[in-house]
Image (cartoon, rainbow, N blue to C red):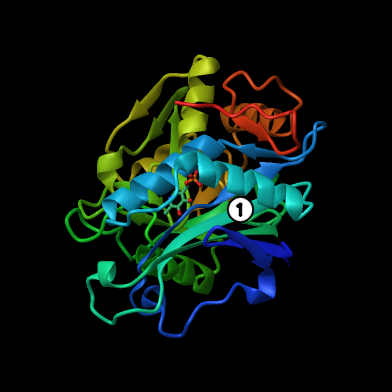
């Protein structure tokens, strides 16, 4: 993992080693941060950030939910991200903007501590392994549930909530699986520790709704759009656990995981036990668009080099 040499911190670009926080930072003690994960892909026209506007919008939504009043406009953050990718000289990278409460008070009302923000870039390969994209991954249903409504705020990407994801991920690793799937408090399928999930049965594409305690994934949105482009019916509905064992195809989506097929759940093979045909078709579209090889018909790419930008507004 190569970390970008420069970090954007509170409105200034500084050397990475100078981008430090206090041991008294509120976020360190109580998880009072919100963040994003964005990928920029190498294309023939240079690096292009995928769905940048949608990620910046979700960052601001997370801030609203968690009562963090950012002193920047969304356009300023969008520009800061594009400038930083260019400045760090990446061809492709992962971008991690984080808004957090710094050193101030130990009071649990985080609004008593100062609001800070940083943007980091790094070069990061395939999150779930190099072969995962083609061959799929073995996963388990976790004994850890996703948070119940009115306990945390699953729609927001809040740092402290990722303790739940850590439990899911650790249990999966310890059991010899690549990832875990958490059920919601009702026992319906929710999502992976850091991915949304899709199931396909008889040509229909299913995915859990927001009310199943999922993060509204940007990749999820893009994949639902691609399904409609390819004329697959998409249904967002509560899905019982058993559906994982009877589906023809199952896959994860996420900025880090991209579109990763699931080849078994709890050691039960999914379909024929490998990547299914619809999953492969969706991957073809997704990776074609992100590589700049298939026309970017939904204006999902923001080109990083000057004069070549298409920033989607609204
Ligand atoms: C808990 C969780 N669910 C789903 C996702 C997928 O969201 P996205 O496609 O926006 O990366 C992520 C990753 O950000 C996540 O952390």
- Residue drawn 69% across and 57% down? 124
Residue reaching furthest right? 44
Whether residue 87 is visible: yes
Mark 1 neighbour class, 10 Å CA radius: few under 14, some 14 to 19, many 20 or more: many
Front residue of this view, candidates 272 and 200? 200
* Extreme residue toward the bottom, this view: 23
Quarter the C terminus occupies: top left
Q: Residue at x 52, y 46 (%)?
A: 77
Q: Which residue is outermost to the left?
A: 150
Question: In the rendered image, which residue does mark 1 sit on?
Answer: 95
Give the percent coordinates (x, y) of residue 282: 60, 29
Q: Quadrant of the N terminus?
A: bottom right
Tell me if residue 247 comes above or below residue 25 in the rendering.
Answer: above
Residue at the image point whose x is 31% and y is 37% from the top: 209
| Residue displayed at 61% across by 53% down | 95
Seen in the picture, residue 16 relative to 157 is either above or below; the reply is below
Closer to us: 108 or 207:
108
Q: In the image shown, does 92 or 238 lie closer to the viewer?
A: 92
Q: Position of residue 186 (x, y in %)?
A: 20, 51
- Where is residue 278 shown, x and y percent of the image? 57, 27
Q: Position of residue 234 (x, y in %)?
A: 40, 24
Q: Is residue 251 visible?
A: no
Camera-side residue: 314 or 75?
Answer: 75
What secondary structure is found at the residue carrying circle 1? strand
The quadrant in which residue 6 appears is: bottom right
Question: In the shown orientation, is residue 59 left or right of residue 2?
Answer: left
């Amino acid at each position: 993992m190569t970390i970008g040499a420069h970090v954007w911190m509170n409105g200034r670009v500084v050397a990475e080693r100078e981008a430090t926080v206090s041991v008294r930072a509120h976020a360190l003690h109580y998880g009072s941060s919100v963040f994003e994960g964005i990928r920029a892909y190498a294309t023939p026209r240079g690096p292009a950030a995928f769905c940048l506007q949608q990620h910046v919008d979700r960052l601001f939504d997370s801030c609203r939910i968690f009562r963090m009043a950012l002193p920047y406009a969304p356009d300023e953050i969008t520009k800061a991200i594009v400038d930083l990718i260019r400045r760090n000289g990446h061809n492709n990278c992962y971008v991690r903007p984080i808004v957090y409460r710094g050193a101030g008070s130990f009071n649990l009302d985080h609004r008593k501590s100062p609001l800070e923000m940083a943007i980091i870039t790094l070069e990061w390969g395939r999150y779930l392994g190099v072969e995962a994209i083609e061959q799929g991954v073995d996963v388990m249903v976790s004994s850890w549930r996703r948070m119940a409504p009115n306990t945390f705020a699953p729609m927001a990407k809040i740092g402290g909530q990722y303790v739940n994801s850590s439990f899911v991920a650790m249990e999966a690793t310890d059991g010899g699986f690549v990832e875990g799937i958490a059920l919601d408090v009702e026992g319906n399928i929710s999502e992976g520790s850091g991915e949304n999930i899709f199931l396909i049965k008889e040509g229909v594409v299913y995915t859990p709704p927001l009310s199943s305690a999922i993060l509204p994934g940007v990749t999820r949105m893009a994949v639902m759009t691609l399904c409609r482009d390819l004329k697959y019916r998409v249904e967002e509905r509560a899905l019982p656990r058993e559906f994982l064992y009877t589906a023809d195809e199952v896959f994860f989506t996420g900025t880090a995981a991209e579109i990763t097929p699931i080849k078994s759940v709890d050691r039960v093979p999914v379909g024929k036990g490998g990547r299914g045909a619809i999953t492969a078709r969706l991957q073809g579209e997704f990776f074609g668009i992100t590589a700049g090889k298939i026309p970017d018909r939904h204006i999902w790419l923001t080109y990083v080099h000057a004069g070549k930008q298409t920033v989607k507004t609204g």
